[in-house]
Image: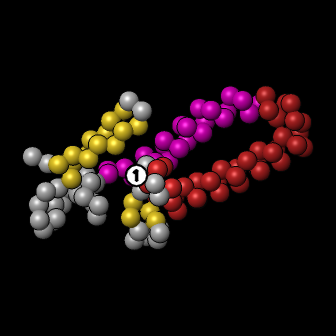
Amino acid sequence: MDDCRRVSSSSIFLEQGIPTSIDNQVSDRDDDGYIKRTGTLMTASAHIITAVIGSGVLSMAWAVAQLGWVAGPVVLLAFSFITNLTSALLTDCYRSPDSITGKRNYTYMEVGGK
């Protein structure tokens, strides 16, 4: 039976199996021992687009109407740069201290080092 690591987030529990084999040569596991993810660039892009479109498109017309034709696009462009910066920071924090070979951080608490 596999050992399970429980990560609690309020009342939600995630159980992820960790391999118990000594040689760690299980093909369905990644470098941290967790089951490999099957997401692709296409599915990740689809999730990001649906999240952004779902919350932003409905309020964009109202925001530009309130700010005007000059300030509206300027503020929209400013927030696009802020969103790009924060997404780059989150991707850098996913593996630390090195973004290529560092240890994966699965929770925000692990990123903070606590």
Task: Please say if 68 is above or below 79.
Answer: above
Nearer to the camera, 74 or 6: 6
Residue at which label 1 appears: 106
* Side of 72 where 40 appears, left or right: left
* Magenta stretch in the rendered image: 37-61
Give the amino acid type for the residue marked by disc 1 in the picture: Tyr
Q: Is residue 56 magenta?
A: yes
Asked if residue 41 shows in the view, the reply is no
Nearer to the camera, 92 or 69: 92
Q: Is residue 10 magenta?
A: no
**Magenta segment, prevailing SS (helix, strand or loop):** helix
Residue sitting at 83 percent across and 48 percent down? 74
Residue sitting at 84 percent across and 40 percent down? 72
Task: Please say if 2 is above or below 67.
Answer: below
Residue sitting at 43 percent across and 46 percent down? 43
Q: Secondary structure at mark 1?
A: loop
* Side of 64 where 7 appears, left or right: left
